[in-house]
Image (cartoon, grey):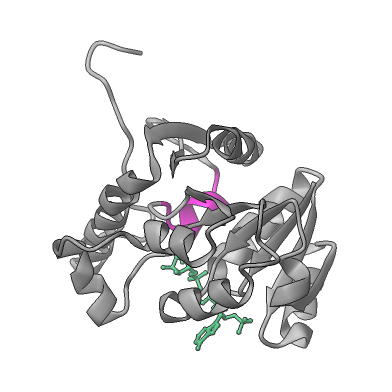
Amino acid sequence: MRIGILGTGSMTAALGAGWTRAGHDVVIGSRDPDRARRLSERLGAAGGTDYEEAARSDVVVIALHDTEVFPIVASLADALDGVVVIDLNNPIDPPAYESRYAGTASLGERVAAAAPGARVVKAFNTVYAERLTESSHEPSGPVQVFLASDDRIAKEVVAGLVRQLDAEPVDVGPLRVSRHLEALAGFEVDLVERGFARVVGFRIVVQGEE
Ligand SMILES: NC(=O)c1ccc[n+]([C@@H]2O[C@H](COP(=O)([O-])OP(=O)(O)OC[C@H]3O[C@@H](n4cnc5c(N)ncnc54)[C@H](OP(=O)(O)O)[C@@H]3O)[C@@H](O)[C@H]2O)c1
């Protein structure tokens, strides 16, 4: 499958490497296509280009600096029509970060509103890149990736991609659950600020089950 990843940060590197190894054509999109090409070469991916071209993919991952998510997604709304879009972004920028305490919609819901035809799945936002690049198996089992979406089929597509990273997809409900997932990511950031290593994370355990 052709997977477009927008942005050239550490999440792009982690996911791009994993899905390239799994045999997908990973195309990286950047403000600076040369930077995308360099990263693509480093990962052995299919290529690097601009956002518009990378958005012409079967699955598109938005992995952008949080303040830039909206303008860029909105400019690509036509290209994203009908496309499975993974939103892994967190509102870390201080004004947006505060919004997790207010009654406003999550970033995931606002991504969906900015590109109304896109089939948005909130995924990966609670998983530090370091947990994906190290062995995905931790003492308690595989890394869990929480998936929130209103689109059942898109969620299944993303669940398959999660499994190819040796991680475990966990369906946590509709896209509005993004509010909780983004709050959880905020908690992880707090923990790291308090001295936890960047391999801190969460898993859902149900007492009495294996
Ligand atoms: N890092 C993690 O462990 C982690 C884990 C879960 C979720 N997230 C979320 O994933 C998203 C990506 O995080 P990241 O750490 O991979 O990368 P990042 O440092 O937040 O930046 C991602 C990319 O955004 C692009 N960008 C576009 N306009 C920008 C601007 N004005 N300033 C800075 N960058 C701009 C840049 O790529 P180009 O310039 O090449 O286009 C940059 O590489 C964020 O929303 C973050 O909250 C991160």
In the displayed structure, would residue 205 be above or below residue 83?
above
Which is more toward the observer, 53 or 170? 53
Looking at the picture, how far across and down is residue 79, in whole percent? 70, 66
Residue sitting at x 66%, y 37%: 164
- 160 in the magenta segment: no
In the displayed structure, would residue 158 be above or below residue 126?
above
Name the outermost residue toward the right: 46
Q: Which quadrant of the rendered structure holds the C terminus? A: top left
Residue sitting at x 71%, y 49%: 19
Location of residue 101 by image quarter = bottom left
Which is more toward the observer, 79 or 167? 79
Residue stretch rendered in magenta on the structure: 127-135
Looking at the picture, how far across and down is residue 116, in whole percent? 53, 59
- 134 in the magenta segment: yes
Which is more toward the observer, 188 or 56? 56
Looking at the picture, how far across and down is residue 109, in whole percent? 39, 57
Residue sitting at x 32%, y 73%: 92
